[in-house]
Image (cartoon, coloured by chain):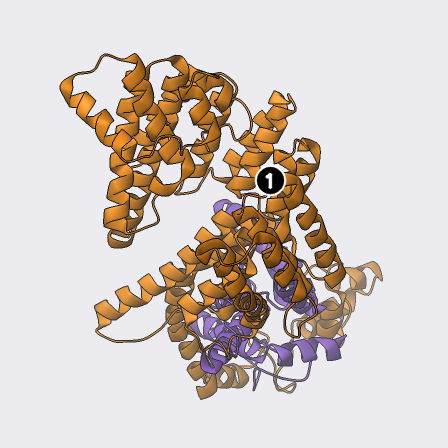
Amino acid sequence: MTVLYIASKILTFPGAYVKAFWEHLTCKLLGLPVESEGYIRFDEACGHVEHAFIRKGWPAYLVATGPGFMNFNIGLWFFFAGFLNLRFMEIRPSDSMVSFVVSVIVAYIGISMLCNVFPLVDDAMNLYDLLYRQKKGNIMGRIFGFIPAVIAYAGSFLEKYCITVILWAVAMVLAFVL
Amino acid sequence: MDKEILNGIPEEENEETVQENTQDAPETEEETTENGVDTETEDTTEKEDVVICSYCGENIASEGSEYCSVCEKALLKKRIPFTGWFMGVAALLFSVAAFVLAVALLVPSGYVWLGDRYSKSGNMHMAYEAYMDAAQEAENFNANINTLLGTDYRILSTGQGVYEKMISTVEKYYSPIDAYYFIQNFFGTDTDNLSFAKKYETMYNDNYTAFTAMSSIFSGVLEKGTMKPDEAFKKIEALRGTEGIKDIFVDYYKFALAYELGEPVETQLEILRALEKSAEKSGEDYGWIYYQPLAQALYDSGEYEQAIAYLDKIIAKNASDYASNDLKMRAQLSLGDEEGAGKTVEKFKSVYTNSEVQYYSDLIQVEYLRATGKYDEAKAFCVEAINREEIPQTNAVVNLVFFLENKLLTASEFNRQSALVDMINGDYEAAFTSMMEAYQMESYYAYYMQGASSLNEPTFYNALYLSAKLMEKNVEMTEETKADVEYVLSMFEAGTMSDGVEAIISGETTVEEVLMKGEFDLA
């Protein structure tokens, strides 16, 4: 499974790399020591950074959801800019090779970012545990953070088993075939 | 050891972590107490609190941390790699451009999506409008952004695929030959790089070859009168099997000649049946060439159900086709199926619900009301239709021409429709006034738009002539009105009008009788 996971990260290299960068930046801002040397490594933490264990609710929430939020907000526009051009405006190589290639690259970058929006399973589990088992953090934070925490929790498993990449691939096939 | 030392993760949820952090640690205080070894309790607790740095694995971790002070300092000093910064910042900056592009693309893409939906439901008129809007929106964006930046970029472009869809709607709405004309108008005559244009070009060339071969025959029999009809038909038939001339076009031009010569509907029907066989034999879809004339011939010969079957085939492909829906409605009314005709009208109207052009949906509605004897409603609807057209707020220059064209055509036709209802009701003065209004609008249209006006349409000039004739016969007129009536009558030669009009004037029949059968008009 790890091989498949690493393959999915390599396949979505731009998004995985940028996601790891956002994680690293978040850890830096929170003053969390980071162990990892590189962002793309051949282990189960590929596309993420290994950081010190978090014992507080808010930092755990930021580390689990912040980088994904950034990737999602950036990736969404990349995706739409490329996808709409290819799917609806029907830009083909015969129209303009440059426009076509740019649209494909932009759409790919967008999808790669949207394939990498969830945290590492350990971070997601830790967040859920801190907020909803140990009940750390204030009540309002826990209420508002519930949906993102659940999405992060579920999404981290989807990403772990490459389901996000598979879903995107299926969606793209359907979008262009149907 | 408490949960804090175990990194805050409950034992049952994080077995691995617990084991990892406790593998070197001695048993818990509680367990020790349970075993009754009280004397060793203090020493054991001291050993338990010692956590080895998880990074170097050698030094003792600082309090509240999993790293020793040396490692923690080193790890905190670790810099984010340059490539990380580069990619992160680049992604952030480019995402702004992507955002602008995506937002700009949303509108034209939305139109293409709409066009696809309309096209799927057979609403070719609306599909065409939507695809056109998509291309227009993309161009508008480029123009606006270039004006703003003083540049000359094509940021948004409409792919050939969209044009292909647009042309496909023209094909389904009219014919492949019209689609080819559209391609030539849009892309010019050099269509080599347009892969989708090939099939239309082939169809155009097939038709053109046949037409060229037959043009001298048509001119001989129709214009010069140097050829008799029988001879003309034989000469056309002789072209069958000639290289480059397809049988389907031989049959089609035989029908066209029969139609132009006013041959009996039975003869036309016979030729059309042969045309249908040629089409089936070819294995290609030639429905566009014969469904409509065949349905009309069947209708004219009273075969209403068969006519409806062919009309349904056209409507299935193009639900926005006015001529087919109108003929279907008339066929249903001729069969006494008023409810079915009403449904046909409603279905057709629904196709045009969101259209900028309500002309055809209004027209079928008013015809239905008149044909079913709802005269007051029909008249009120005519006024509503004339007043509906308002100056659009967007794309002023383009739409002003469109608006004027639409306005003039609408005013002309619905005044004529109103006149027909007045003639049925015996209000000849109102009928003549409406027809004069229609005539004026039609003249404006012919003059300003230089378009093919309805002045030469039998339905139009028959109605104009009849309204003047009925005024002359039945109404005491002022000098001014009399002059108008005389002017109108002077434009036509008595005895050259349609059989229905001549019969009404001679008193053999009534306006109502003529308008309630056949064409349901004064054709």
Question: Does residue A44 appear anywhere in the picture?
Answer: no
Quadrant of res A43: bottom right
Residue depicted at x 63% and y 35%: B299
Quadrant of res A149: bottom right
Question: Which of the pair B221/B62 is nearer the observer?
Answer: B221
State the image coordinates of residue B314 (x, y, percent, origin top left). Answer: 62, 46
How many numbered marks does the figure carry?
A: 1
Question: Which of the pair B147/B245 is nearer the observer?
Answer: B245
State the image coordinates of residue B141 (x, y, percent, origin top left). Answer: 32, 63
Question: Does residue B427 appear anywhere in the picture?
Answer: yes
> Relative to B123, is A105 above or below?
below
Question: Which of the pair B298/B167 is nearer the observer?
Answer: B298
Query: Any idea which chain is the purple one in this picture?
Result: A
Residue depicted at x 62% and y 87%: B56
Which residue ends up furthest to the left in the rendered image? B479
Q: In the rendered view of the protein, which quadrant contains the N terminus of chain B?
A: bottom right
Residue depicted at x 64% and y 21%: B336
Question: Which of the pair B369/B75 is nearer the observer?
Answer: B369
- Please, which chain is the residue tagged with disc 1 on? B
Which residue ends up furthest to the right in the rendered image? B35
> Relative to B125, is A120 above or below?
below
Q: Secondary structure at mark 1?
A: helix
Q: Which residue is mark 1?
A: B296
User: 10 Å neighbourhood of mark 1: few (<14), some, or many (≥20)?
Assistant: many
Asked whether, in this view, residue B39 is left or right of residue B295, the answer is right
Query: Any idea which chain is the orange one in this picture?
Result: B
Give the residue type that dot 1 points to: Gln
State the image coordinates of residue B293 (x, y, percent, origin top left). Answer: 60, 45
State the image coordinates of residue B189 (x, y, percent, origin top left). Answer: 43, 75
